[in-house]
Amino acid sequence: GAEKILCALGEFDYLTAEQITRLCYAPSSLSFVKKKLRLLVAAKFVLALPRQSVTTPTVYTLTGKGVAVAEMLELSHA
C-alpha cells in the first residue's frame, strides 16, 4: 500500500489524501490512505505541509528519504 503512495507523490510532488485515493485506490479507501500517510509521516518518508485553516485538506510531499525510496521503487518497476 505504501509503495503506491510513495510512487504517486514521486510523480506528482504534492497531493492530498483524497487525490492519492482517486489516483491509486478505490473511493472507499480514503481512511486506509490517511492511515498509511500518518505512518509515512511518522517514518519521515512523507512531509505533511502546514494547512492554511482546519477546513483546508492537508497536502503531502516526499522528504529526501521518501524521494530516494520512490526512485528505487520506480527503477524496480521499469
Image: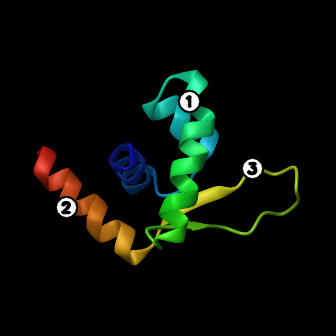
Q: Which mark is residue 29?
A: 1
- Residue 30: x, y in percent? 61, 34
Is residue 77 found left or right of 64 in the rendered image? Answer: left
Distance between the Cα atoms at labels 3 and 2? 29 Å
Q: Which residue is mark 3?
A: 57
For mark 1, give the secondary structure: helix
For mark 3, give the secondary structure: loop
Is residue 2 found left or right of 68 in the rendered image? Answer: right
Q: Which mark is residue 72?
A: 2
Q: Residue at x 54, y 69 (%)?
A: 42
Q: Earlier in the sequence, mark 3 or mark 2?
A: 3
Q: Residue at x 53, y 30 (%)?
A: 22
Q: Residues within 10 Å of mark 3 (few under 14, many from 20)?
A: some
Q: Residues within 10 Å of mark 2 (few under 14, many from 20)?
A: few
Residue 16 makes an appearance in the image: no
Task: Please tell me whether mark 2 or mark 1 is closer to you in this view.
Answer: 1
Q: Earlier in the sequence, mark 2 or mark 1?
A: 1
- The amino acid sitting under disc 3 is Pro
- The amino acid sitting under disc 1 is Ser
Q: Residues within 10 Å of mark 1 (few under 14, many from 20)?
A: some
Q: Where the N terminus falls, by quadrant?
A: top left
Residue 41 makes an appearance in the image: yes
Distance between the Cα atoms at labels 2 and 1? 25 Å
- Residue 76: x, y in percent? 12, 51
Q: Residue at x 11, y 45 (%)?
A: 78
Q: Is residue 68 above or below residue 33?
A: below
For mark 2, give the secondary structure: helix
- The amino acid sitting under disc 2 is Met
Name the one closer to the observer, 52 or 45.
Answer: 45
- Residue 75: x, y in percent? 14, 54
Q: Earlier in the sequence, mark 1 or mark 3?
A: 1
